[in-house]
Amino acid sequence: MSDAQSEPPAVVRGADGLARPLWASVDPLLTAYYDTEWGMPVRDEQGLFERVSLEAFQSGLSWATILRKRPAFRLAFDDFDPDAVAGYGDTEIERLLGDAGIIRNRAKIVATIGNARATVRLREEVEGGLPGLIWSFRPEVTPRPVSFADIPTSSPESVALAAALRGHGFRFVGPTTMYALMEAVGIVDTHLLDSHRRGSSGVWPG
């Protein structure tokens, strides 16, 4: 059997007749996320701060783990209100470290608080604040992947975005993490061409 013949299918057609990538077909939670949220534009400050924070916590873990803990994260971090999180101190750090509902990683918790403070500062430092900065790195073209292997894990724009955010005091914002963010919030469209979600964001044509 050739390599091409032994490769898994690029998309899986569900019982509802809709074609999705394998990762979005193995768990109802991931399927719902893929069908309703992943790749759709997020342009508000609070929404983007949440996504930056969750992408940082996801590093080294599965996205399904983060989605299952997302309600607890929202409760623990005041719904990711940057002004509220920016005011956290030692008392809140200890509270978060004792919260079994979230990822209890001190470095990531401290970074999230620092990133909230950086988000607040960006309102004065960059036109449009955090949304203006992140969306300024939208590329001129988006990938058109036929298979999962065609999807990049970083790009010149994600490298530049990571550097820009670090320059403004953000942490846990490496190029790979930022590319995942760009995929999740619609800045690039990496839906497979055969997926029923391709082109659904309205940012890019199918």
Image: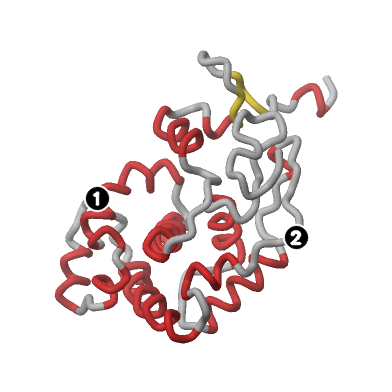
Q: CA distance from mark 1 to mark 2?
A: 37 Å
The residue under label 1 is 72
Quick one: label 2, few (<14), some, or many (20+) residues within 10 Å?
A: few
Q: Is residue 75 left or right of residue 163?
A: left
Q: Position of residue 119 (x, y in %)?
A: 40, 75
Is the residue 188 above or below the residue 201 in the image? Answer: below
Q: Are marks 1 and 2 in contact (CB under 8 Å)?
A: no
Going by the numbered disc 2, the residue's amino acid type is Glu
Is the residue 50 above or below the residue 109 in the image? Answer: above
Q: Secondary structure at mark 1?
A: helix
Identity of the residue furthest to the right in this view: 2
Residue at 52% x, 32% y: name it: 24
Q: Quadrant of residue 92?
A: bottom left
Q: Position of residue 31 (x, y in %)?
A: 47, 31
Residue at 36% x, 78% y: name it: 114
The residue under label 2 is 140
Q: Position of residue 120 (x, y in %)?
A: 37, 78
Q: Secondary structure at mark 2?
A: loop
Going by the numbered disc 1, the residue's amino acid type is Ala
- State the count of labels: 2
Q: Mark 1 or mark 2, which is nearer to you? A: 2
Is the residue 192 above or below the residue 73 in the image? Answer: above
